[in-house]
Image (cartoon, rainbow, N blue to C red):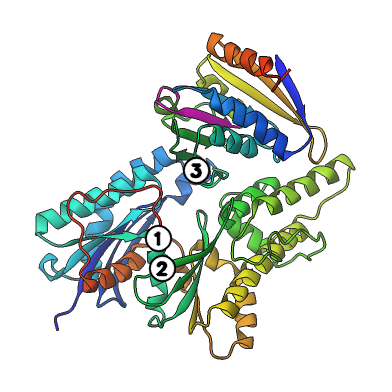
Amino acid sequence: MNDIIVLSIESSCDETSCAVIKNGNEVLANIVSSQINIHQKFGGVVPEVASRHHVGNITLVIDEAIKEANIDVKDITCVAVTQGPGLIGSLLVGINAAKAFSYAHNLPLIGVHHIAGHIYANHLVQNLEFPLLALVVSGGHTEIIHMTSHLSYEVIGKTRDDAVGEAYDKVARVCKLPYPGGPHIDKLAASGKDIYHLPRVMLDQDNFDFSFSGLKSAVINLVHNAKQRNEEISIPDLARSFQESVVDILVGKTLKAVEKYPVKQLLVAGGVAANSGLRNRLNEEIKHYPYLKLIIPPLKYCTDNAAMIGVCGTFSYLKGERSDLSLNGYANLDLK
Amino acid sequence: MYSVKVNNEEETLIVAYHLGKKLFPGCLITLDGDLGAGKTTFTKGIAKGLEIKQIVNSPTFTIIKEYEGKLPLYHMDVYRINDDEDLGFDEYFYGNGVTVIEWANNIRSLLPHERLSLNIVILSDNARHLKFTPFGKKYGQICEDLKHEKIID
């Protein structure tokens, strides 16, 4: 059988990325142009600004990826692109580039769900085996997904308010730490102690849903009340207390799901998978489940990247899924 | 100025819900108040009044979130934005939806004159004082209507 070479594009948020994936598990190129320095001064991703930078970067990353992969355009089998969810202006830049490329070179076009991409990043570490559970944690998502076969997704739990990454950014703001908040809190937490006893919201409930809004409010109230009493708050201790609560909730809910759904693999996906507190705890807890394999992708495949879209796109291609030139972007898109 | 004291999150949501029901295309609501005052909670109530079914959460990470309902809702958090940055606000302010801006004081010079300004003052862990200042006739009428319905004083 001929090699399947997928050219993939991801532009759903603030990274412009193009990758070339061979046979679903070999990364020939994965070019990521991050806008993080641009958005840092705003303390978050500004949609209008992100779109403009995607437009400036998209053809550059495509050229770079093809060059680095050392392939000829005629070697490419199909084009895969993130169609949602994400920022609509950002998504459309990648989608239109993908459409133009597929039209110009007469290649099949495949739309890929961003979260499915995050899950399939794990396939670059180890072949996916079913059934499996995936914990997806990022700036925009907090979900537990059950899969019994390729490309079939059942969302068994999700956040009822803020995504976990959003809670990190907000708590970083309270602690006057820079954006993005996650890495800063993670670093400070290592030197702090869990002395503030923050709530573990919804951990006792018999479902797999999350809520981080209450935890965020608890942090704000703690800081506010301390200020009124002229008491000093230890930022490392607060960071540790917050992180312990988040990790307790994420890991607690995930293990509950593992008890209910007998699976072979537990995957972690999304930017918050880079968090050392979460990684350490999962590595510890997984020892109680000798039959279960834990997969956490390397950092470069946790954050947004086109390689993961190319992997998922390969499976979609093999299944016969095709999009036509009417392919559109969707800010909100359910995983089905 | 119009105002009302609320004892908890539920009461905040009720006030915001009734406000949301009265909004029309091109409305601008600005929200100010300390961290944790309840700006996002208030926006959730407005969203309910606009018959938005999706989960409305904090736009900290993406700064602007858009939702579809009876009218579109544009929810912004301009905590770290300054007056001198043009982020395409006019397209929202003069669009077909309702714009809600958290930390609006940070971009005061970019705001159109006509708007409804809400300042949320923290009284205790749960109680809040909601202070409304309408700019322009249309927003004055909305406040009068809410007062007439005994939602605010």
Foreground pick, B146 / B78: B146
Q: Which quadrant holds the C terminus of chain A?
A: bottom left
Q: Which residue is mark 2?
A: A153
The magenta segment: B93-102
Q: What residue is rendered at 35% in x and 46% in y?
A: A90
Q: Amino acid at mark 1?
A: Leu
Disc 2: CA contacts within 10 A as few (<14), some (14-19) or many (>=20)? some
Task: Give the x, y percent position of residue A288.
Answer: 64, 87
User: Tag 1's secondary structure?
Assistant: loop
- Pointer 1 local density, CA inside 10 Å: few below 14, some 14–19, many at least 20: some
Separation of marks 1 and 2 at Cα, in angstroms: 7 Å
Please state which of the two labelled residues, at mark 2 or mark 3, is closer to the viewer: 3
What mark, if any, has residue B53 been given in the picture?
A: 3
Residue type pointed to by label 2: Tyr
In the rendered structure, the residue with mark 1 lies on which chain? Answer: A
Number of marks present in the image shown: 3
> Which residue is at the far front?
B149
Q: Which residue is mark 1?
A: A335
